[in-house]
Structure formats: structure tokens, C-alpha cells
Image: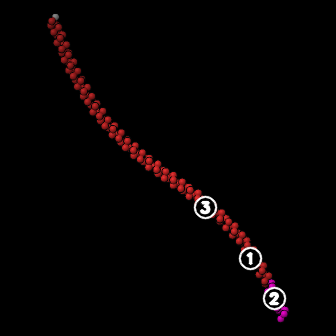
Amino acid sequence: KENNFKDEINKLNEELTTLRSTFDDKENNFKDEINKLVVELTTLKSTFDDKENNFKDEINKLNEELTKLKNDALLLEKEIDDLKHKLEENNTSKVRLEKHITNLDNEKEHLMELLNSKESNVDSFTKDIQLLEHERDKLTTDIN
């Protein structure tokens, strides 16, 4: 019986040694895995930080560009308003000029009517003068 106990104790000791060895191997494997994960996590954090900084830089550039575009839009809006104002002034001037041209056309027409009337009178006077000259010549001939 004692031998059986000794054999049993030896078996248990061997098993304990095997378990310790297996435990040490697994512990070392876990430590290696954890170290690999820590390195990978550090690399990922560094990559994330770089990308985050790049995004922040890009956002800042886009905000600057947006501000510039807004300022350009405000300048264009002012320029459009100025052009609209000039267009309104030009339209007002155009209307005034069109009225003035119409008035000048009406005055020209009136003057042409007067001129025609005067020409008609001149023609009538010319005929009267010719008749009078003819009468005078006739009378002069009669007197002589």
C-alpha cells in the first residue's frame, strides 16, 4: 500500500510539474499576446492621433476656405446691388431720354407743319407776285 501511495504521489507530482510547465507556457504566451496587443494598440492610437490631427487641419483649411467664400459672396452681392442700382438709374435716364426724344419728334413734326404752311404761303405769294408783275408789265405796255 505504501508503494501505491508513493506511486500515486509520484504521479501527482509529475502531473503537478506538467501542469506548472503548461501554466508557465500559457502564462508566457498570454504575456506575449498582451505585449503584442499593447504594441498594436499603441500603433493604432498613434495612427488615430495622426488621422485626427489631419482631419482637424483639413477642417481648419475648409473653414478658412468657407470664410473666404462667404466674404467673396458678400462682395459679389454688393457688386450685384451696385449694378442693379446703376441699371435702375440707367432705366430712369432711358425713360427720360425717350420722353425727350418723343417731345423733340413732336416739336419737329409741328415745325414741319409750320414750314409746309409757310411754304404754301410763299408759293401763294409768289403766284400773287407773278400775277402782279404780269399785270404791271401789261399796264406798262399799255401805257407805252
Residue under pointer 1:
119
| Element on which disc 2 rests | helix
Closer to the N terminus: mark 3 or mark 2?
3
Residue 56: x, y in percent? 37, 41
Residue under pointer 2:
136
- Dot in front, 3 or 2: 3
Above or below, 96 relative to 42: below
Closer to the N terminus: mark 3 or mark 1?
3
- Please say whether residue 139 is one of the residues in the magenta stretch: yes
Q: Main secondary structure of the magenta part?
A: helix
| Element on which disc 1 rests | helix
Considering depth in this image, is 26 or 71 the residue closer to the camera? 71
Considering depth in this image, is 50 or 10 the residue closer to the camera? 50
Above or below, 27 relative to 137: above
- Please say whether residue 80 is one of the residues in the magenta stretch: no
Residue 130: x, y in percent? 78, 84
Considering depth in this image, is 69 or 134 the residue closer to the camera? 69
Quadrant the C terminus occupies: bottom right
Left or right of 41 in this view: 128: right
Residue 132 sits in quarter: bottom right
Specify the segment rendered in magenta.
Answer: 131-144
Left or right of 37 in this view: 110: right
Q: Residue furthest top?
A: 1
Residue under pointer 3:
93
Left or right of 126 in this view: 23: left
Mark 3 and mark 2: Cα distance apart in space: 62 Å
